[in-house]
Image: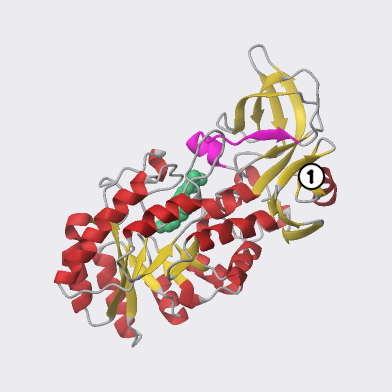
Amino acid sequence: MKFFSRHDAELCVESVPLSRIAEEFGTPCYVYSHAALTAAYQSFDSAFSQREHLICYAVKANSSLAILNLFARLGAGFDIVSGGELARVLAAGGDAKKVVFSGVGKTADEMRQALEAGILCFNVESESELERLNKIAGEMGKRAPVSLRVNPDVDPKTHPYISTGLKGNKFGIAYTDAVRLYCKARDLPHLDVAGIDCHIGSQITEVTPFADALDKILLLIDALKNENIEIHHLDLGGGLGICYSDETPPPVTDYADTLLEKLADRNFKILLEPGRALVGNAGLLLTKVEYLKHGDTKNFALVDAAMNDLMRPALYDAYHAILPVMENTGVAQRYEIVGPVCESGDFLGHDRHLHLAEGDLLAVMSAGAYGMSMSSNYNTRPRVAEIIVQKNNTHLIREREKISQLFALERLLP
Ligand code: LLP
């Protein structure tokens, strides 16, 4: 099934034309396809079906309660990086026993919150964190299940801001330190060694870096066996890329088959933490052209969405396809697609070949991951509405913020 397709020249999400969404909910807004979200989850899940596994959706990619709830109903677990994300997962009906907690800076309060909830595993990223977790679990009369997030020092060949498994990154425990720290974890009285974890980066479009990371982790698992340390699960993180323009990420089946082949004679459970691959291509940002401005050297289309709504272009120079909602045959010109925020970095796309008129609707594609979840109120702009389309129905899953809400927590000086 095509989740985003044209009917009578108009771009639709499932069976709903985007002009209907703009009319009903206004612009800008994020629009997601229920079927696309479901299909992405199910293809991941079924690719690993031949062995015991748990898909822990990386909440940071899109933390909407409705999306978390949808994945929870499909059986997903969750990868969280804050107490806030844990609260969201629980509010959305997620099961704490399927939650893994990643992140380099877990606070004592967050550890208590997660121990109280009874999560599946803490992915520990430093020796100090190991000691703190042991202490807090002891104070609470509990034992904390842990994996060490090991840094396999593999180059994921992606944008430097989103590579995480290299020696110079702040993430994970150095490969050469892992055995020593596992022995320490085994000997600390309030910890239980549950698994091993690695995550090498994001938007990875080849299988090789994942395979290389897995090889190194398997060697480590063998070294741990010599110390009588058995692990019960192997968490391979997230990172599988999607197509934004002409990238050719491996299909999830190839990714899974490569990993599963290496795991054939091992019997532990597999955990994965995909984020982008489950939501990225299931959503778009719908925006309207406010003004066209024809400068000396460039044409600008000023749209009502901006870098605060979708930060990826400004932050990573990321490319998102931008499609006219109504296909037209007028003569196209080259446009800079820019927002109203007072920064030259406020662009959604450079040099796009489009025929535009003021009032036209545009769809910024592949915006389901790290779009809404990275949005801000910069320039005191309310965060936009979010809608899930399911066949011919629309569900408002987040109202557009009201301006009064933006400063409701603020106080004047006495
Ligand atoms: N697990 C851990 C520990 C992570 O740090 C991440 C992402 C994931 C899983 C999910 O990775 P994914 O499957 O989505 O690649 N804001 C950036 C992406 C940052 C990714 C951070 N960590 C972007 O917009 O491209």
Residue occupying image coordinates x 76% and y 32%:
289
Viewer-nearest residue: 193 or 105: 193
Residue drawn 60% across and 44% down? 378
Rendered location of residue 144, percent (x, y): 34, 78
User: In the displayed structure, would residue 322 be above or below residue 20?
Assistant: above
Describe residue 230's horizontal placement relative to residue 257 as left or right. left
Does the magenta-highlighted stretch encompass residue 321? yes
- Foreground residue, 63 or 330? 330
Can residue 253 be seen from the camera position used here? yes
Quadrant in the picture for the C terminus: bottom right
**Three-letter code for the amino acid on which mark 1 is drawn:** Leu
Q: Which residues are magenta?
A: 311-324
* Residue 412 visible in the snapshot: no
Q: Position of residue 168 (x, y in %)?
A: 27, 45
Direction top: furthest residue = 296
Q: Residue furthest bottom?
A: 141
Whether 380 is drawn above or below 123: the answer is above
Q: Nearer the viewer, residue 208 or 33?
A: 208
Measured as percent of width and height from the top left, residue 219 is found at 21, 59
Numbered marks: total: 1
The residue labelled by disc 1 is: 18
